[in-house]
Image (tube, rainbow, N blue to C red):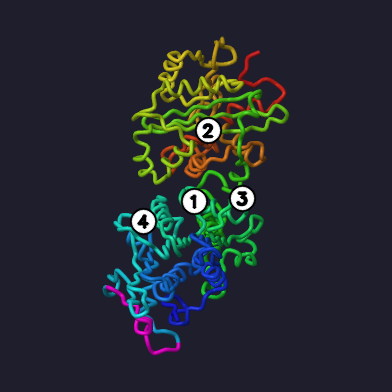
Amino acid sequence: MLTITGGVKANEPFNLLWYQAFITGQLFGWKRADTGFWRFRSVWVETGKGQGKSPWMAGLGLYGLRFSGVPRAEVYSAAATKDQARVIFKDAVSMVRAQVPDNDETLEQFCGIRPRGTGDETWKLEWDGAAEGLGTCTFSPVASSDTQSGPKPLLVLVDEVHELKSADVIETWEQAITKVPGNSCLIMGTNTAAADQVVGTEYSDYYEDVVLGAREDDTSLVFIARTDKDDKPFEDPSCWAKSLPALGVTFERSNIQAQVQKAQGLPSKELAVKRLYFGVKVGAADCWIEWGLWESVLGDIDEAEFRDWDCWLSLDQSNRIDFTALGKTWIRPTDGHRFVKVRYFTPADTLAQRADEDKAPYVAWAREGLIEAVPGPTIPKAHVARAVKEEMVRNRVVGMAFDPAQIQDFEEAARDVGLDVWRYEGPDKPGGSGLKMVRHGQGPRGFDSPSSLWMPRSVRETEEAIVNKAVTIHRSPVTNLCSANLMLADDGLGNRTPAKRRSRGRIDGMLTVIMGMGAAGGMVSKATQKSWWEED
């Protein structure tokens, strides 16, 4: 019925690939016994790049429009912008205007689907089903900014989810589908997202949990094609078909061979190829650490277990209108294993604005308690000081590593809230009472400072602990985003520090992780002895 309209197979019949046939059969084959309607309300399809997801989704849209038998069927190709939404829609228009296989007529002539508009300016597909009692059925591209008056979608098609900067598109159509009492489904196609592509990563993680049985969702159909963790796609081509189900059919083997060859010796290109074609989860193109290593040390932390363990705090303050991060690093006394968790504070009044600027779901994270939204336009220093005081009560705090920026404001606020603090000046200098505060440099200088922690050493301490699985970092999408954004700068002598200006976005949480790991490092090296910051 449909014809391939582009690529090396152009003008050949559009026969479903095995994975497309499987998903299509599951979607339309399963029906609920009590209602007779489709079982699935959402479909997630994640494969390597170039596997025919867009034309397949266009074909589904045409099926919904013309052959579903649903009265006044509404089909939408949705995206953040109209140009993005038109990608699937243009495939559908091309199929309508193409000749039906083994027939002299186009699909438009054969089954009455009418394009509204000409050429690239086509803005809607319609079918008049009045003769069959189905009324007018439509297929339209829509952007997030388009106003829809009470849509009742049969199918919503969202491609390239990994490119979305906001979840608004998906959330809007999920709400619309929820209101439809009969058949209605959101179909999403994507490549594996990079860790700094927050929307794609969160949805991918959700649907992966559904597949693995970690999350129960009987209304979602999920198909994820990736290479396995132990596979080495750059060395072993036999694993390519796992993430590329169209390999050798509509996707030529030479295509991926060329990509692999180009990526040899180019780390950023290699990461991109691994993610886009083989489904390997990575950070950003030049992320500070291999993403699989990062994920391997993530876990759920119960702070109540650590109350009697030594704990280092670490503080990265904002300019009062941004984010402030307070890290906690506990040290297990038996083996020095560290457990890290970060608290995030930000002004509530500007949260939505910064969420829009950063294209990150800060508002949702605040609702979930992952970010502490402080009432007002700024974060009062006293609020941060009180939070530190709370942690002093809850934990056996050894000291706090701090970024020197704005620390005097914190010290004044600490005194105002009744928290005694003192700065560590070196092993030969007198100490004080209350919270010991240790300066943590942010650049490559300070290697031999007796009173300050050195950032390159802390970076190395963090990396080695991750590689050796000597740390557990609390699983948090906020910290994940900070890690994905982080880039390191090298001073030419092998001393690496966080590159704040070059990093893609906010890295506050990772700065506190690194500072806390550096502060705890001396204690870990001799777990049964006192910290090397403690005086004799």
Query: Which residue type does callout 3 highlight?
Result: Ala
Depth check: give the residue in front, 453 or 140.
140
User: On the image, numbered disc 2 is attached to which residue?
Assistant: 342
| Camera-nearest label, 4 or 3 | 3
Classed neighbour count for the residue bearing mark 4: other residues with Cα under 10 Å, few (<14), some (14–19), many (≥20): many
Left or right: 29 as drawn, with respect to 60:
right
Residue 227 appearing in the image: yes
Left or right: 290 as drawn, with respect to 117:
right
Q: Which mark is residue 174?
A: none
Q: Are marks 3 and 2 in contact (CB under 8 Å)?
A: no
Instruction: Find residue 1 and report its horizontal and vertical position in percent.
Output: 45, 81
* Secondary structure beneath label 1: loop
Depth check: give the residue in front, 472 or 403.
472
User: On the image, numbered disc 1 is attached to which residue?
Assistant: 285
Which mark is first along the chain, 3 or 1?
A: 3
**The magenta stretch spans which residues?**
102-116
Classed neighbour count for the residue bearing mark 1: other residues with Cα under 10 Å, few (<14), some (14–19), many (≥20): many
| Camera-nearest label, 2 or 1 | 2
Which mark is first along the chain, 1 or 4?
A: 4
**Residue 71 found in image quarter:** bottom left
Q: Are marks 2 and 1 in contact (CB under 8 Å)?
A: no
User: On the image, numbered disc 3 is attached to which residue?
Assistant: 214
Q: Which mark is residue 80?
A: 4
Q: Residue at x 54, y 28 (%)?
A: 454
Instruction: Find residue 111 and report its horizontal and vertical position in percent.
Output: 38, 82
In the image, is residue 53 part of the stretch drawn in magenta?
Answer: no
